[in-house]
């Protein structure tokens, strides 16, 4: 039986597996009904039994009995506090909240203990477990439960930073993807605006004011960002006019609601991120991301002599400390490159870049 369990290549969700005294037991996590343990999980007999229990499991979106985890979850989603979360963060919490209710929704909140949540987190990878813990804390706080007190987020590998793009990488991308291609438009939009993908997909002509600034409120921080769109450039950014011209040449003709829309529909932020990564790899550029373009522009502001306030305005930062990360990096580069550093060749006119 042990070898049979190890050899199974298909493992269906919401199946609890337990080896006891050399015998394998399986049952559905939600309905608690036994499942065939003597056949693999891709066997028609097992699939039929599992499908029947899936159909019988309660919907995670039901109200739930009073005092249950499901009831607390439904009540939490109706609060102003929950509604004030950004759309992206709210979607993340909903995904984990629904998963919690699918597995434990009928359980009473009063019976919830720290060990129960630890068990739930132990089944997830570190990053997913951290997000799940945030959801548990929200539910427990709303239901006045102290089950999450003393729990710390799981240790996860250090996140890989989004490194700025180098000048030769930017030139290589532009050579591979000419103006008129979707890959080029996505690149120029992110490179010039320094917007996160969650914001870039929303931007359109309506965000450009009569002053020539592209102004938007960020999804993540709710803080405004201001990008020179058609206005005069600051003195320290005067040599970036070529970059901005390349963006304007890449924009779709005619009326659109969002600059990056596809077939009249707003592009997803995940799709935009994947587009940049795949297009970069096609151009022979590896390890560089859409968010790395944000880091590139903000670093260039610091290197060009832009103030910390300029970085905060363009990048929409909330605190000085966030913006100062770029000025510190720029100061280190100036030590090596000299204070009279000439304009980076990434800003060459289109003909030169594509030659």
Image (tube, rainbow, N blue to C red):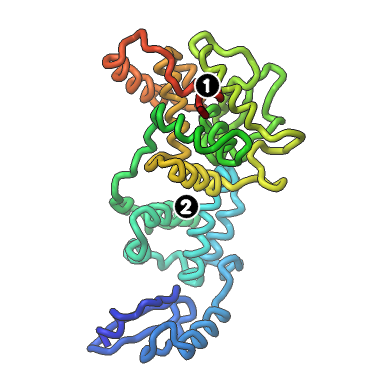
Number of numbered discs overlaid on the protein picture:
2
Quadrant location of the N terminus in the rendered image: bottom left
Residue 157 image offset from top left, x and y in percent:
29, 49
Report which residue position mark 1 lands on: 313
- The residue under the point 53% across, 35% down is 187
Residue 250 image offset from top left, x and y in percent:
63, 31
N-term mark: 2 or 1: 2
- The residue under the point 54% across, 21% down is 349
Q: Is residue 59 above or below residue 159?
A: below
Residue 81 occupies which quadrant of the picture? top right
From this viewpoint, is residue 4 visible? yes
Closest to the observer: 316 or 281? 281
Closest to the observer: 41 or 121? 41
Report which residue position mark 2 lands on: 138
From this viewpoint, is residue 81 visible? no
Residue 19 occupies which quadrant of the picture? bottom left
In the image, farthest residue toward the front:
355
Q: Which mark is residue 267?
A: none
Residue count near mark 1 (Cα–Cα under 10 Å), binned few <14, some 14–19, many ≥20: some
- The residue under the point 67% across, 19% down is 212
Q: Secondary structure at mark 2?
A: helix
Closest to the observer: 157 or 59? 157
- The residue under the point 36% across, 8% down is 340
């Amino acid at each position: 039986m042990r070898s049979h369990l190890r050899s199974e290549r298909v493992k269906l969700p919401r199946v609890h597996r337990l080896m006891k005294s050399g015998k394998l037991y399986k049952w559905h996590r939600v309905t608690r009904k036994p499942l065939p343990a003597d056949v693999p999980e891709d066997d028609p007999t097992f699939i039929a039994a599992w499908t029947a229990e899936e159909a019988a499991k309660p919907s995670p979106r039901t109200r739930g009995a009073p005092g249950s985890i499901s009831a607390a979850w439904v009540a939490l989603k109706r609060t102003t506090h929950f509604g004030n979360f950004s759309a992206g963060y709210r979607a993340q919490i909903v995904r984990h909240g629904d998963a919690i209710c699918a597995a434990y929704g009928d359980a009473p909140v009063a019976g919830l203990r720290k060990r129960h949540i630890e068990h739930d987190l132990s089944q997830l990878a570190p990053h997913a477990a951290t997000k799940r813990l945030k959801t548990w804390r929200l539910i427990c706080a709303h239901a006045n439960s102290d089950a999450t007190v003393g729990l710390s987020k799981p240790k996860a590998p250090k996140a890989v930073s989004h490194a700025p793009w180098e000048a030769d990488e930017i030139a290589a991308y532009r050579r591979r993807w000419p103006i008129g291609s979707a890959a080029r438009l996505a690149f120029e939009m992110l490179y010039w605006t320094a917007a996160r993908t969650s914001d870039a997909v929303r931007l359109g002509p309506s965000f450009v004011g009569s002053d020539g600034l592209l102004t938007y409120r960020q999804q993540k921080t709710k803080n405004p960002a201001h990008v020179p769109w058609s206005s005069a450039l600051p003195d320290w950014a005067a040599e970036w006019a070529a970059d901005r011209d390349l963006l304007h040449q890449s924009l779709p003709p005619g009326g659109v609601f969002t600059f990056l829309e596809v077939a009249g529909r707003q592009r997803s932020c995940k799709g935009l991120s994947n587009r940049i990564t795949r297009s970069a790899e096609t151009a022979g550029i590896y390890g560089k991301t859409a968010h790395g373009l944000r880091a590139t522009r903000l670093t260039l502001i610091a290197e060009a002599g832009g103030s910390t306030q300029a970085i905060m305005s363009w990048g929409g930062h909330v605190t000085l400390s966030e913006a100062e990360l770029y000025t510190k990096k720029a100061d280190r580069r100036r030590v090596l490159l000299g204070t009279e550093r000439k304009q980076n060749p990434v800003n060459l006119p289109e003909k030169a870049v594509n030659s």
